Image (tube, helix red, strand yellow):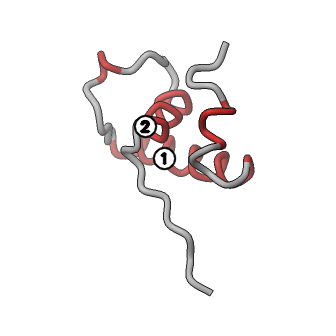
Amino acid sequence: MIYPSIDKLLNIVSSKYELVHIMAQRSKQMHDYNNYQMKKDEYKSYSNLGKSMEEIEKGLIKITKPEK
């Protein structure tokens, strides 16, 4: 089972496509720069994608909408 659930994350992010995009960007940052916002033992997930989902759920990633 995925933690946190996609349903919880979709209350934070407007669409699943945007969620995937944010997760991919954050996962790449984690991999390339070894940049984590929590201590590694605080994450429940093993993969960087799961860790990025946890950061979104905890509000550690600020999601902004571009102005039109």
Say few, some or many: other residues with alpha carbon within 10 Å of mark 1 (under 14 / 14 to 19 / 20 or more).
many
Of residue 25 and residue 17, the one placed in the foreground of this image is 17
Q: Residue at x 57, y 47 (%)?
A: 12
Quarter in which the C terminus is drawn? bottom right
Reply above or below: 29 against 36: below
Circle 1: element type: helix
Reply above or below: 22 against 67: above
The residue to which callout 1 is attached is: 26
The residue to which callout 2 is attached is: 55
Quarter in which the N terminus is drawn? top right
Q: Residue 52: where, in percent of width, then height?
A: 49, 37
Q: Residue at x 43, y 37 (%)?
A: 55
Circle 2: element type: helix
Say few, some or many: other residues with alpha carbon within 10 Å of mark 2 (under 14 / 14 to 19 / 20 or more).
many
Q: Are marks 2 and 1 in contact (CB under 8 Å)?
A: yes
Tell which residue pokes out farthest to the top in this image. 1
Tell which residue pokes out farthest to the left in this image. 39
Reply above or below: 57 against 33: above
Residue 39 as seen in the image, left or right of residue 3: left
Q: Residue at x 49, y 66 (%)?
A: 64
Q: Hey, what amino acid is under mark 2?
A: Glu
Residue 18 as seen in the image, left or right of residue 64: right
